[in-house]
Amino acid sequence: MELRFELKQLHLKETFSIAYGNYDKRDALLIKLSHQNCEGYGECVSIDYYQIDLQSFVLKLKEIQSRIEAQKIIHPEEFFKFLLSFNLHPFLLSALDCAYWDLFGKLENKSFIELNQMPSENLVQSSITISVGDIDNQIQKIEKSSWNKFKVKCKGLDKNNVKRLLQLNRNIALDSNASFTDEDCIWIQENVEVQQFSYLEQPRPIHQYKILKKEGFANWMADEDCQNIDSLDELIPYYNSVNIKLMKCGGLTPALDMIKRAKELNYKIMIGCMTESSVGISAGCILAELVNYADLDGANLISNDYATGNFVENGKIILSQKPGLGIKLK
Ligand SMILES: C[C@H](N)C(=O)N[C@H](CCC(=O)O)C(=O)O
């Protein structure tokens, strides 16, 4: 097996504004694993509020490259166990795990869905993100959009904006990206009208969720608070829903385990994404049958997507049915 990797830069079609900042680009690390005539792809991106340093990932890859290349082709679950021995950051682990699933499926001439005997007929629809901004602009974007589901970003709580969004009578979720105060959360969970939001994501800064009550009117969803399977048990009293992202949890292999455990614990589950190319999104899309919500618009927000594969069109998730994760570089 051969391992290659490349730093790329993704450009946002328009400034992506969330409570943490405004972003016009994202740096990405593309992983290529090849064997015989097949090549599999995986990706992770540099997110400042997760302190991701792609240069340190490149150094790590150089350090472990020869051991990865010496590995023979084994089942992806076995390969994942092998990757665990390197103690990798979950973002890098995810890129390698996804690249290997893509390669393995291509070598076996089977899609990920076939390899895992998963259903794929009833995929949930994805939301599109509406950046933080003036409420009139946000509403205009929703009204003009051909998508049906929206994740509206906000920075702090503005009760008038909440009222105006609810008046639209559309399928809308709110994502505060850790910008609500304790008082905001109390008001929200005691206000019956917020039931109309499909979910309210990451209300408080990380680990400061003890004010949340899952019995209130809000469908609280943990994102930054829910990094991996270990977070699930401790969040039960506070959160109704969890946002599982491949980069946070370390890839497709742990995501399958995490979805299973989250279901046992009666969470509603979202498969989410970062601003990322179709390399990352192709992997996320194949889990859409297993979850209640999808937020997989990452590649739709990028102007220089460098891959094709599974994709989202006006919210509808379309699986390529091709071997592996179906990823091809443009
Ligand atoms: C792109 C996706 N809809 C989204 O909003 N993800 C963000 C983080 C993305 C990023 O910072 O690149 C989130 O769920 O907070």
Image: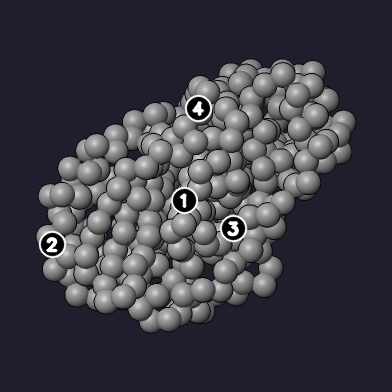
Helix, strand or loop under label 1: loop
Q: Mark 3 or 2, which is nearer the eye?
A: 3
Say whether mark 4 is within 8 Å of ligand 1: yes
Percent from the top left, x then y, of residue 190? 74, 28
Residue designated by label 1: 306
Tag in front: 1 or 4: 1
Q: Is mark 2 on a helix, strand or loop?
A: helix
Asked whether mark 2 lies closer than 8 Å to ligand 1, one says no
Q: Which amino acid does label 2 sit on?
A: Arg
Q: Which of marks 3 and 1 is nearer the N terminus?
A: 1
**The disc labelled 3 sits on which kind of residue?**
Phe
> Residue at 60% across / 46% down in the picture?
300
Q: Which of marks 3 and 4 is nearer the N terminus?
A: 4
Looking at the image, residue 148 lies above or below residue 212: below
Task: Looking at the image, tell me whether mark 3 or mark 2 is earlier in sequence order.
Answer: 2
Callout 1: CB less than 8 Å from ligand 1: no
Q: Quadrant of residue 27?
A: top left
From the image, tell me which residue sits under label 3.
311
Q: Distance between the residues labelled 3 and 1?
A: 13 Å
316 vs 228: above or below: below
Q: Is residue 99 left or right of residue 312?
A: left
Identify the element where label 4 is drawn.
strand
The residue that disc 2 covers is 67
| Residue 6 image position (x, y, % from top left) | 30, 48
Q: Is mark 3 on a helix, strand or loop?
A: strand
* Residue ID for mark 4: 23
Type of the residue with mark 4: Tyr
Q: How crowded is mark 2: few (under 14 residues within 10 Å), some or many (20 or more)?
A: few
* Mark 3 and mark 4: Cα distance apart in space: 22 Å
- The residue most toward the front is 330
Residue placed at 61% from the left, 21% from the top? 155
